[in-house]
Image (spheres, rainbow, N blue to C red):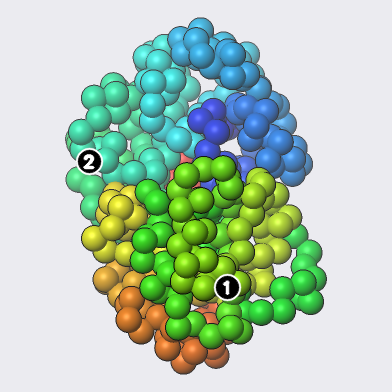
Amino acid sequence: MEKIALVEIGGSHDECLLTQMDAIKQSGRKVILITTQVVMDRNPFFSDYIDSLLLLSEAELKNKMKSMRKLLHFLKKEGVSKLVLNTAQGNHIRNLSILALFSKIEFIGIIHTTRKFNDSFTQKIIHKKIKKYLLLSAFLKDKITPQKGISLDYFYPIHFNKASINHEKFPKKTIVVIGGVENRRKDLEGFPQLIKNVGNDFQFVFLGKSDPNQAEVIVFKKRLIENQLSDKVIFYDHFVSNEEFSQQIQLSTAILPLVHPNTPSADQYFKNQISGAMNVAFGYHKSLLIHEEYSLIEEMQPASVYYNLENFSSILEMNKDTFIEISAQMKNNSSFDVLEQEKRYLSFILG
């Protein structure tokens, strides 16, 4: 039986793994996972899909070459035919690509930012081994002109481990901001202005850990207090478990990436990479609240309600029924169907 290995040793992007594991498992192949204890602790349900597991410790990963030799030895011992690098960038992956340059194991990479195709010397070395890459959106794929010999496609990692929900737990209309308070990824500066006229029947949840001791969290909360907006916003001061995350998303009204033009958030998203909020919305069939600047991104259009900084509150009020309609339409859209995306993924990595 063919064995396909997945690698995620960077401690992030593990939300992309479940779609891949399920696709491989459903195809009748064995799933081999190389990751860290941190990733497994966050996702204990991964065990249901894994046939063989290698955990690399933080201490081991500090030696970038030795740890990659161990990884490659494990792949050969397991008889792996294909290796999918869930985050196909960085020095570890460069070293692994060099070590495996003449190995018969096919390497396939998932890229999370198009910058890696533009100005990364490390990535050019990785390209020597990896000739097939997946991106996480059609929009990003279409922005890249790959060098000769490299194949590109995209898929949406939208298979999530959904928890049971208690509808009485969150009585208000909830707008979810994926992740914690972070200036680099979200327009925190514009947020108070954005929500100041929003009615009290809405609440906003930053669905990720916002460390109350961090300076940017302290400053942000202070601004909310000064603008008398604290009652409208909920934070988590701890790691958000899969169960908590899933419950909040399922009971939410819409998902707000909080990406706005001409802010640090725009340097991160909808330019070189797609916000993780997009695939969460696709997977849970939830509406996206997107700034009108990004209305030309076609793949988000069936899921989106558009706003600008001046009309945000009225857009929320006017579209209470629209959010429900969009969710219903997404359930019948093949682009947001888990099985269709798993087929798309499999077709590429097996092709």
Q: CA distance from mark 1 to mark 2?
A: 46 Å
Measuring from the top left, give residue 268's x and y in whole percent.
33, 50
Of circles 1 and 2, which is in front?
A: 1
Neighbor class of circle 1 (other Cα within 10 Å; few <14, some 14-19, many 20+) is some
Instruction: Identify the image quadrant of the N terminus.
Output: top right
Q: Is residue 126 above or below residue 273?
A: above
Is any part of residue 325 visible from this angle? no
Q: Answer above or below: position of 265 versus 109.
A: below
Q: Amino acid at mark 1?
A: Lys
The residue sitting at the top extreme is 66
Q: Residue at x 69, y 42 (%)?
A: 43
Circle 2 residues within 10 Å: few <14, some 14–19, many ≥20: few
Q: How many marks can you see?
A: 2
Query: What residue would you read off at disc 2?
Result: 146
Residue at the location (44% across, 27% down)?
A: 106
Dividing the picture into quarters, in which one does residue 205 lie?
A: bottom right
Which one is in front, 100 or 274?
A: 274
Q: Does 72 appear above or below 30?
A: above
The x and y percentages for residue 188 are 41, 59
User: Mark 2: which amino acid?
Assistant: Pro
> In terms of sequence position, does the residue under pointer 1 or pointer 2 come before the other?
2
Q: Can residue 44 be seen from the camera position used here?
A: yes
Q: Position of residue 244 (x, y in %)?
A: 71, 57
Which circle marks residue 102 in the picture? Answer: none
Q: Residue at x 72, y 31 (%)?
A: 51
Mark 1 residue element: helix
Residue under label 1:
232
Position of residue 212 in the picture relative to residue 246 (left or right): left
